[in-house]
Image: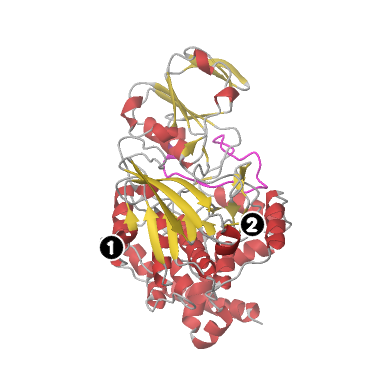
Amino acid sequence: MAHRVAIVGAGVSGLASIKCCLEEGLEPTCFERSDDLGGLWRFTEHVEEGRASLYKSVVSNSCKEMSCYSDFPFPEDYPNYVPNSQFLEYLKMYANRFNLLKCIRFKTKVCSITKCPDFTVSGQWEVVTLCEGTHKSAIFDAVMVCTGFLTNPYLPLDSFPGINAFKGQYFHSRQYKHPDIFKDKRVLVIGMGNSGTDIAVEASHLAKKVFLSTTGGAWVISRVFDSGYPWDMVFMTRFQNMLRNSLPTPIVTWLIARKMDNRFSHANYGLIPEDRTQLKEFVLNDELPGRIITGKVFIRPSIKEVKENSVIFNNTPKEEPIDIIVFATGYTFAFPFLDESVVKVEDGQASLYKYIFPAHLQKPTLAVIGLVKPLGSMVPTGETQARWAVRVLKGVNKLPPPSVMIQEVNARKENKPGWFGLCYCKALQSDYITYIDELLTYINAKPNLFSMFLTDPRLALTVFFGPCSPYQFRLTGPGKWKGARNAIMTQWDRTFKVTKSRNVQESPSAFESLLKLFSFLALLVAVFLIFL
């Protein structure tokens, strides 16, 4: 059984891992190479080696009710989508509330993690660190790696003929901090993920002209969704997830396409994804359609050739003058402190059982936390991973035999599309609710809707039809939080508190009251049929 645990990284997942270790009676030591906690969410004016980098204007893509730790809601007065500076403050509140700082060694780089000579018996690891020029070595019973996947920029310059002759400026989006550099420039942003789209929109307020180049297109949605609600509180419900997963994939993708086109036609804006069968991560941007329709951002296909002061796009013979190129081409990830025999990275993924445990180790004493891309928030995802992982490291929960784990890992790597539900075929992608529920099942913490409906029907209806907020993960089982029910029942109150800042008198009509009554009756019938 593990007792001393080394944790690499004091970001979102690292903090959750420390807390989970303390709750299970273990002794965690967290090594953080920078001088403060926060990981991705700590903005600095300069890029730091080995740490994720963000730009000044970054705002969370998941709302506060869906992206908090499961037993620690955001402050009520925080906006629904949280700027990076406030997100960092929240992480510091979390660390202080649960007394995590005592376990963190700042300015300490992990140089290597290797198996001890008696690993097949003890499962122990030797961790070598560097702090203020001094190397130290220590033995740990287990290791949790929480370094994320946004530290190594992917810059495929070989795919852009002529880039070496370009006389302007080019850099990866990891280097971007402020939009001032784009003033009166002609800017090209390559890559239409969240960062690329954000940078193109920001540049369009200052630049002479902005092009956004995309190979495959993307669905672009606003944080402000149906009736002004946060998008993920509407989209991420157990009811909708069950409905999506019970329908054939072609029907689900058709419904998703119709929903995405409610706000504007992606085809008319040159944005529609070429491959609409495999779900690509949504692009969250509130301004892009408006910048396109006002001629501030121009959508273009992939690059055919780069010249000294211009570029040529595929299927468009005209040369476009360009001063700055931003490569928003994503990231690769690696574990430089681990030998490949422990965790090998191939084709953008690692051989990890349930995205956590190396499947081939003789002893399950190393876990990777946060190396997954769910459609939902990474905060509760990493936290739930840590809750299960710590119980495995402690010996409370057991893993299947290595042969079973390897078989599952290999099956996932084949990326075979299923017949039902959304198709998650990209590396590290996962169905958020399904994945979380699976991990909760392993620790007996998954909400039992049937028994809940018998004992607390109001809560059961809210859990099933309402947002799948992280508080649901603390209703039962190990780590049960007594405030979970109240947090679930008041989540909409906190959502509206920061938006409904002016009292408005609403007079409901008789028709609306009648409609609500019929809707409630229909809801009861639906629940009755579901639980038959």
Residue 527, position as x, y percentages in the image:
59, 78
- Is residue 269 at least partly visible in the picture? yes
Badge 2 local density, few (<14 within 10 Å), some, or many (20+)? many
What's under tag 2, amino acid-wise?
A: Ala
Q: Residue at x 56, y 32 (%)?
A: 214
Quarter holding residue 28: bottom left
Magenta range: 267-290
Which residue matches tag 1?
96
Q: Is residue 132 above or below residue 103?
A: above
In this picture, residue 520 sits left or right of residue 89: right
Image quarter where the C terminus lies is bottom right
Residue 8 to residue 501: above or below: above
Residue 281 point in image, percent of width and height: 55, 47
Q: Dot 1: within a 10 Å radius of its alpha carbon, few (fewer than 14), some, or many (20 or more) residues?
A: few
Q: Is residue 275 magenta?
A: yes
Q: Residue at x 28, y 55 (%)?
A: 89
